[in-house]
Amino acid sequence: MAIIFEAKQTKINWQRWITVLFIIGFFSATIYYLFFSATPKFEVILPIELKEAEIIANSQYIDPSAVFKNKNLEKLQNFASKPSLGLNGRENPFIPF
């Protein structure tokens, strides 16, 4: 009678391999899109008011003296009073009441 030794055949756990490959693929795609891909350029359509404000802000030909000597600006009234110094808090906030 002959004794036959056969190598033990291991069963491949396909579910584990698929899960590991999915996790590696997910992290690879995440790292690629976060750090290496080109950023998409968004076209922003500005309202007319903001376009006009941008034109005024970028203008270099505004004379400050002409603005402050404007008659309409001089007619405006100041309704806010100047801030005054008051007592805020205690002299030593760490002492007990």
Image (spheres, rainbow, N blue to C red):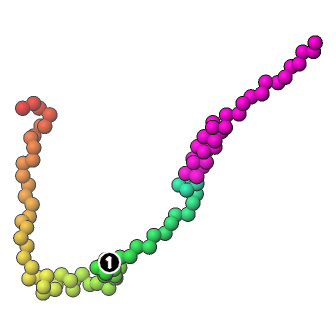
Tell me where residue 14 appears, x and y as whole percent.
67, 37
Residue placed furthest toward the right: 1
Whether residue 33 is visible here, answered yes or no, is yes
Tell me where residue 53 appears, x and y as whole percent.
30, 78
Q: Nearer the viewer, residue 12 or 90?
A: 12
Identify the residue under disc 1: 47
The answer to which image quadrant residue 70 occupies is bottom left
Instruction: Please tell me which residue is depicted at 32% across the width and 85% down the height of the picture.
Output: 61
What amino acid is found at the position of numbered circle 1 in the picture? Pro
2 sits to left or right of 17: right
Instruction: Please tell me which residue is depicted at 6% across the width and 65% down the height of the picture.
Output: 81
Residue placed furthest toward the top: 1
62 sits to left or right of 11: left
Q: Where is the C terminus found, in terms of image quarters?
A: top left
Assess disc 1: are there few (<14), some (14-19) or many (≥20) residues with their C-alpha within 10 Å of its C-alpha: few
Q: Is residue 20 above or below residue 69?
A: above
Whether residue 57 is visible here, answered yes or no, is no
The answer to which image quadrant residue 11 occupies is top right
Does dot 1 land on a helix, a strand or a loop? loop
